[in-house]
Image (spheres, rainbow, N blue to C red):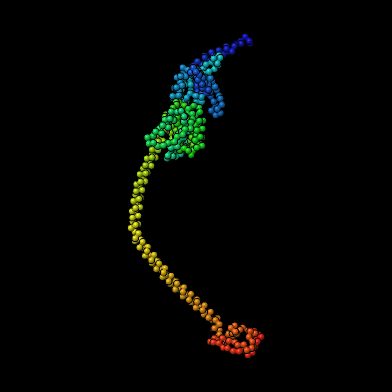
Amino acid sequence: MTENKISLVELNSLVRRSLESCLPDTYWVQAELSDVRTNATGHCYLEFVQKDERSSSMLAKARGIIWSNVFGLIKPYFEELTGQTFHSGLKVLVEVSVNFHELYGYSLTVHNIDPTYTLGDMVQQRQKIIKQLENEGVLTLNKELEMPILAQRIAVISSATAAGYDDFCNQLKNNKWEIPFYAELFPAIMQGDQVEKTILNALDAILERGDDFDVVVIIRGGGASSDLSGFDTYLLAASCAQYPLPIITGIGHERDDTVLDVVANTRVKTPTAAAEFLIDRMVAVYGQLKELKIRLNRSSVRVIRAEQQRFHSICAQIPAITRSVFLDERHRLERMRSRLKHGTQVLLTRQKHDLDKIALQVKSVSPFEILKKGYALVISEGKIVSSVDNVSLKDELVLRLGDGELVTTVKYKIKNHEA
């Protein structure tokens, strides 16, 4: 058994020769890019992986290399057609040859790439995200927001060093109508794998001061148009679709709409176009205000003239109205005076009748009336005598009758014991 032993190098050489004889051709392979990196000499080293579509578990992996002479050709070709940088996570269709090295092992050497396959996958992923947003009922929420009539307070999400941001600000500031705008930058990285994270952070910062702004403008300028994958993520699209302020996108990509463009309230091509859109709206509003001012002036003149005519008409009617009112009031006073006189007479007659009744009653109980009926009032020494005990024999008494007085002297007294 030991006579058949071979070294590892010999075994690996055997494997290499076997693979070269069994797999001499190139093959078009579908895979996903992983761990893509380029060294100083221009060679691209990467891994090809295949995952289970349901569980995302790894099914296969192979080391790959694209030599600099090939990579210098296929990279710009791929990025130009797809609008994407050659980065990890992309699904690609590549032409490879199978290699085995005694020291480095199994690998795939890339000779060509088909960008249309990646484009199809990108479109498919984009449509998948759009369909998911539509099923969740949020796809058109931001589009349904009404753009403010006066959109002058603008929150800008862009790279601070981007030429597109400067173009946007200069376009707003130097508009020929001298319309004032207030634009505040919320910096974000606009290409690469930090796009989603930094834009979401900027949106959160704007939302904390939501009352300070009318619209949000997301612009991307001054960089390559190849890296748009950051604008095609579900999380960013869902956040923008449900954002409470209208979003305007101008990310400088004229050929295709990203998912962010689809959910935004308004999509324009470039940062400059975004500024022109805002300026045009303000110009339109100014035009409407100017027309309203003209109409208001005309209406005011008509109203003033009509009111002047009405005023003159009223002034002309005042003397006649005054005479009519005076006569009406005079007649009313005459009627009131007549009613007052009649009422006073009725009241006086009633009061006189009541007084006569009271006089009769008073007269009927008067002592003089009683005396006229035969009664006498006995007076002694100026005082009325009410008892026989109040006089003595031979006292002089005055008897006051109804028609005069009698003077007499007391001869004797008879006491009425029943009194």
> Residue drawn 51% across and 22% down?
36
Residue extending furthest toward the top: 3
Location of residue 128 in the rendering, given as x and y in whole percent from the top left corner? 49, 31
Residue extending furthest toward the bottom: 411
Location of residue 260 in the rendering, given as x and y in whole percent from the top left corner? 47, 32
Location of residue 395 in the rendering, given as x and y in whole percent from the top left corner? 62, 87
In the shown orientation, is residue 313 left or right of residue 15? left
- Taking depth in this image into account, of 141 and 131 the one nearest to the observer is 141
Name the quadrant containing residue 393.
bottom right
Q: Is residue 385 above or below residue 242?
A: below
- Taking depth in this image into account, of 25 and 276 the one nearest to the observer is 276
> Residue drawn 57% across and 11% down?
10
* Residue 228 visible in this rendered orientation of the protein: no
> Residue drawn 49% across and 78% down?
356
- Taking depth in this image into account, of 2 and 165 the one nearest to the observer is 165
Q: Is residue 163 above or below residue 313?
A: above
- Taking depth in this image into account, of 356 and 43 the one nearest to the observer is 356
* Residue 297 visible in this rendered orientation of the protein: yes
> Residue drawn 43% across and 37% down?
152
Quadrant including the C terminus: bottom right
